[in-house]
Amino acid sequence: MSLVGGIAIFFVIWWLCLFVVLPFGVTSQHEADEIALGSEPGAPHEPFILRRVLATTALASIVFAGIYLYFNVYGLRLDDLLQ
């Protein structure tokens, strides 16, 4: 795997992990009974974006490390997954 290919794969994994991490621990403004004037009641009360970005990066790093080990260190292929 080249450097550019590794970065591209990590980028895709990171975005997929972001969509997994985003819904955890979200409290809507309606649930918190603090609706900001002019906003949607279902909007997050406190989104904690930095915490979610860090959790996404950690999860994506673990997934990428697994993929890197499987394909580059152990030298396996996609066909080996089916066996």
Image (spheres, grey):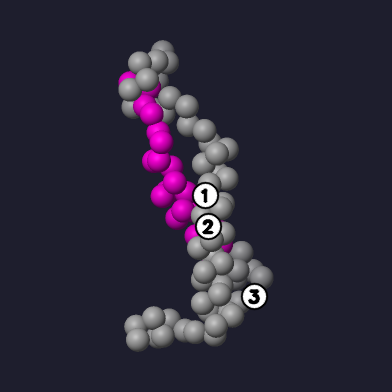
Looking at the rendering, in which quadrant would you find the N terminus? bottom right
Where is residue 30 drawn, in percent x and y? 33, 21
Q: On screen, 65 above or below 76?
A: above
* Residue for badge 3: 2
Q: Residue furthest top?
A: 37
Query: Does 52 sit above or below residue 39?
Result: below
SS for callout 1: helix
Q: CA distance from mark 3 to mark 2?
A: 18 Å
Q: Is residue 9 above or below residue 37?
A: below
Residue bearing mark 2: 60
The quadrant of the picture occupied by the C terminus is: bottom left
SS of the residue at dot 3? loop
Q: Is residue 59 left or right of residue 27?
A: right
Residue 18 covered by magenta stretch: yes
Image: magenta residue range: 9-30
- Could you tell me residue 62's position as x and y percent? 54, 61
Report, in whole angstroms, how far the alpha carbon at label 3 lies from the one at label 1: 23 Å
Q: Is there a contact, CB below 8 Å, between mark 2 and mark 1?
A: yes
Give me the residue at 44% from left, 46% from top: 21
Q: CA distance from mark 2 to mark 1?
A: 6 Å
Three-letter code for the amino acid on which mark 3 is drawn: Ser
Labels 3 & 1 near each other (Cβ < 8 A) = no
Q: Is residue 40 visible?
A: no
Tag of residue 29: none
Q: Which mark is residue 56?
A: 1
